[in-house]
Image (tube, rainbow, N blue to C red):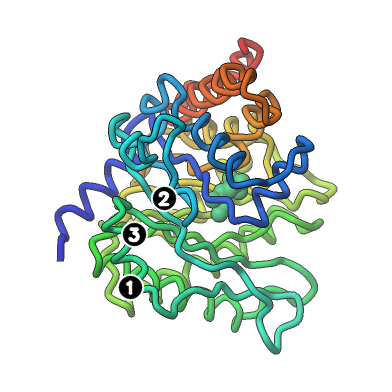
Amino acid sequence: MAQHDLTKTARAMVAKGKGILAADESFGTIEKRFKSINIASTEEQRRAYREMLFTTGDFGDYISGVIMFDETIRHKTAQGMPFVDLLRKANVIPGIKVDSGAKDLAGYPGEKITEGLDGLRERVAEYYRLGARFAKWRAVITIGDAMPTRFCIDANAHALARYAALCQEAGIVPIVEPEVLMDGGHSGERCEEVTTTTLESVFFHLHAHRVSLEGMVLKPNMVIPGKKAAQQWSPRQIAEATVRCFMRTVPAAVPGIVFLSGGQTPAEATANLDAMNKMGTHPWELSYSYGRALQDEALKAWLGKPENVAAGQKMLAHRGHLVSAARYGKYNPKMESAA
Ligand code: 13P
């Protein structure tokens, strides 16, 4: 059903100069983020924080869609306007995280499996009624000694494909997110090997589940050395390895690839995306779906205080314009200091 709409929405999510804001932190994650600025995670602070982000003046210039959490998609502004309506007015597509988190994979110590398939058909139908037009499901792949196992990769790819098929049945574009973590000291080559195997498995299972590639968006990690690796890479090396890996694994029918930032700093995530788009045109749009890289500077300027809302919005707008420039390969690190 709704095949045309899925394709249209997927394309709109990766429109030129735009990308996605991941603001779908679960209760545990937002508590961690708020702790970093010494504030408690109350429902009102969470609402106020998201209102600050979503009411940033020129938001719709660089944001095509926002991923929300279950609590957030039901929230309203202080003036009483539902967030969903606020976003729509700014020409931003409402989205929703539908997985219920990565849990320990029984029998495979150190590895994770993402839960949330039970009752998903009913939940996506409800989110559609609430206004969501795309969804997100994140699978986590860990690199370590004898990890990841083939079983962990395939189990996660299978769940991602079941989720994606259920979303498309409901007229919702699935963001398929297999994240190979950058934690650890592994090399960039090792990340490329694991990312390649993971994406091969993901697309095998997407085909098996009859998922329309035109009506989905892929959200992967960049191919990048582990945070603790002795040998770090330049943006150009990261860009070349990442594009090479995707050319081998991601069908051209997929309209766009939106990266997660995964622990890169805002400037790194911007420079790395920029380097890929500087390489020229690719079969898919290469864009962003950053959480931390879009929010961190705004969060630090806000500090939970109403009088800092304008300062927080200024930081989000600044980063938004930089990542938007990176969509065209027109970013320069010198632009960082303009804030
Ligand atoms: P980060 O950009 O902070 O990695 O978050 C993106 C996201 O949505 C992870 O699921």
Residue 21 visible? The answer is yes
Which residue position holds label 3?
127
Disc 1 crowd rating (10 Å Cα; few below 14, some 14-19, many 20+) is few
Which element carries disc 2, helix, strand or loop?
loop
Labels 1 & 2 near each other (Cβ < 8 A): no
Disc 2 crowd rating (10 Å Cα; few below 14, some 14-19, many 20+) is some
Residue 241 visible? The answer is no
Q: Which mark is residue 74?
A: 2
Tell me the quadrant of the picture where the N terminus can be found: bottom left
For this orientation, the residue located farthest to the bottom is 107
Estimate the x, y position of residue 75 in percent, counting from the top left.
44, 45
Q: Which residue corresponds to the image point at 76% horizontal and 81% vertical from the top-left?
A: 109
- The quadrant holding residue 35 is top right
Q: Earlier in the sequence, mark 3 or mark 2?
A: 2
Which residue position holds label 1?
122
Q: Which mark is residue 147?
A: none
- Above or below residue 258? Residue 56 is above
Q: Which residue corresponds to the image point at 62% horizontal and 43% vertical from the top-left?
A: 238
For this orientation, the residue located farthest to the top is 338
- Of badges 1 and 2, the one in the foreground is 2
Q: Amino acid at mark 1?
A: Glu
- The quadrant holding residue 196 is bottom right
Tell me the quadrant of the picture where the C terminus can be found: top right
Q: Which residue corresponds to the image point at 70% horizontal and 44% vertical from the top-left?
A: 33
- Above or below residue 304? Residue 132 is below
Q: Earlier in the sequence, mark 1 or mark 3?
A: 1
Q: Earlier in the sequence, mark 1 or mark 2?
A: 2
Which element carries disc 3, helix, strand or loop?
helix
Q: CA distance from mark 3 to mark 2?
A: 10 Å
- The quadrant holding residue 298 is top right
Estimate the x, y position of residue 220 in percent, counting from the top left.
52, 55
